[in-house]
């Protein structure tokens, strides 16, 4: 657990970066600090490991005040991940990751074995071990940064805009990888981001901070979307929060999945036409994994990849209302593809099916 009690940070020119912050990050959970520039979120993060010293108040790690700890020893208890990874350019990847275990007295052999294990855990091949940071992409460097922060097996982790320096596709991949990793390791994490979508996706709880260093609202992502505390939070979370709140509503058993006829890639035009519903037919591979939609009227001999419309997304059968609705709305046929855990076709849903299920759920409040 990380706890702030009436923590403030004021500078000699009178600027108050953080003002009487009270906040608790529960053990094993990910707490996200989010807010506009100048709201004190990064200052708050850096006061935890005393890169910035508080002006007043107390910060606790598992009920121990950090003010009484040796700063160097404190930092060795805390994993720290920053933008651009902050890797040592003159050290190989394996040696970058092994840095903290070596500082803590582990043998070089043991530290490197631990580093190789962590490379696998964060999705990096062992062949990268002897490369240098400049030989990796930005997303790969961020994975190394996460592995290095985990190398000493810290109970606490601080993450300052860890995924902001990479492109949107890589960022989404890193977020998914990190969620998987957190489910496995269950660290106590405080993360800073300026991106409300990232905060809602990753956080077990989210603290929305306002300029002046005060918490406007601390809540679960679902609570923020369905019941923002005031106009500032409502505006910051965004005007499409009613739709986004569906991302926290389990759709399993609520929406009827319809059987969908499908054809394999390479099927004849006649077979595609016979299986079509309306103007569209769903195309699958030999393992019944959806590939895309096709219009049989455009097929002359056999279905080929160039016939596929790839605009539709797919939803997991036990996914959320938002995923099902998005699948239906993004599909050219307006029938959303539903798959199982292995990616195999289960059936389809329509937007009407999903909306009926939403209206039938009494606990789904309309976000104000």
Image: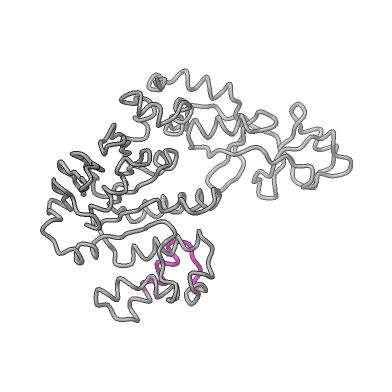
> In the picture shown, does residue 100 fall above or below 357?
below
Residue 365 position in % (x across, y down): 39, 20
Residue at the farthest right position: 300
Residue 281 position in % (x across, y down): 74, 35
**Horizontal placement of 343 versus 298: left or right?**
left
**Horizontal placement of 346 versus 276: left or right?**
left
Q: Residue at x 75, y 32 (%)?
A: 280
Residue at the farthest left position: 68
Q: Residue at x 31, y 35 (%)?
A: 210
Residue 110 position in % (x across, y down): 33, 78
Is 186 a magenta residue?
Answer: no
Residue 32 position in % (x across, y down): 33, 43
Disc tally is: 0
Q: Residue 366 falls in which quadrant of the image?
A: top left
Quarter of the image that includes the C terminus:
top left
Q: Is residue 102 visible?
A: yes
Is 125 a magenta residue?
Answer: yes
Q: Which portion, as a residue range, is magenta?
A: 114-126
**Horizontal placement of 261 versus 248: left or right?**
right
> In the picture shown, does residue 100 fall above or below 322?
below
Q: Residue at x 54, y 51 (%)?
A: 167
Q: Residue at x 48, y 54 (%)?
A: 165
> In the picture shown, does residue 66 fall above or below 362?
below
Camera-nearest residue between 18 and 186: 18
Camera-nearest residue between 252 and 80: 80
């Amino acid at each position: 657990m990380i706890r702030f009690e009436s923590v403030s940070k004021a500078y000699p020119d009178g600027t108050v970066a953080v003002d009487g912050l009270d906040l608790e990050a529960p053990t094993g959970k990910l707490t996200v600090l989010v807010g506009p520039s100048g709201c004190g979120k990064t200052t708050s993060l850096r006061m935890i490991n005393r890169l910035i010293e508080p002006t007043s108040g107390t910060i606790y790690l598992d009920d121990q005040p950090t003010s009484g700890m040796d700063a160097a020893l404190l930092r060795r208890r805390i994993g720290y991940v920053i933008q651009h990874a902050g890797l040592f350019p003159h050290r190989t990847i394996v040696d970058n990751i092994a840095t903290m275990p070596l500082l803590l007295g582990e043998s070089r052999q043991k530290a490197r074995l631990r580093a190789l294990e962590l490379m696998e855990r964060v999705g990096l091949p062992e062949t990268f071990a002897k490369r240098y940071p400049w030989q990796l992409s930005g997303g790969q460097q961020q994975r190394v940064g996460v592995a290095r922060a985990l190398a000493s097996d810290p109970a606490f982790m601080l993450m300052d805009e860890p995924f902001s320096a990479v492109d949107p596709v890589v960022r989404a991949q890193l977020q998914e990888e990190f969620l998987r990793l957190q489910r496995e390791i269950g660290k106590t994490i405080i993360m800073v981001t300026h991106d409300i979508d990232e905060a809602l996706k990753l956080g077990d709880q989210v603290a929305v901070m306002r300029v002046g260093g005060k918490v406007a609202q601390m809540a679960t992502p679902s609570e923020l979307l369905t019941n923002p505390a005031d106009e500032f939070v409502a505006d910051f979370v965004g005007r499409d929060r009613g739709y986004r709140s569906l991302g926290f509503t389990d759709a399993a058993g609520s929406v009827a999945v319809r059987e969908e006829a499908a054809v394999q890639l390479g099927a004849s035009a006649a077979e595609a036409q016979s299986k079509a519903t309306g103007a569209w037919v769903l195309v699958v591979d030999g393992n019944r994994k959806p590939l895309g939609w096709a219009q049989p009227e455009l097929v002359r001999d056999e279905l080929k990849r160039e016939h596929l419309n790839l605009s539709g997304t797919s939803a997991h059968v036990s996914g959320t209302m938002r995923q099902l609705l998005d699948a239906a709305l993004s599909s050219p046929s307006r029938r959303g593809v539903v798959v199982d855990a292995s990616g195999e076709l289960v059936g389809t849903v329509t937007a009407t099916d999903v909306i009926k299920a939403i209206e039938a759920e009494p606990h789904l409040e309309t976000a104000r």
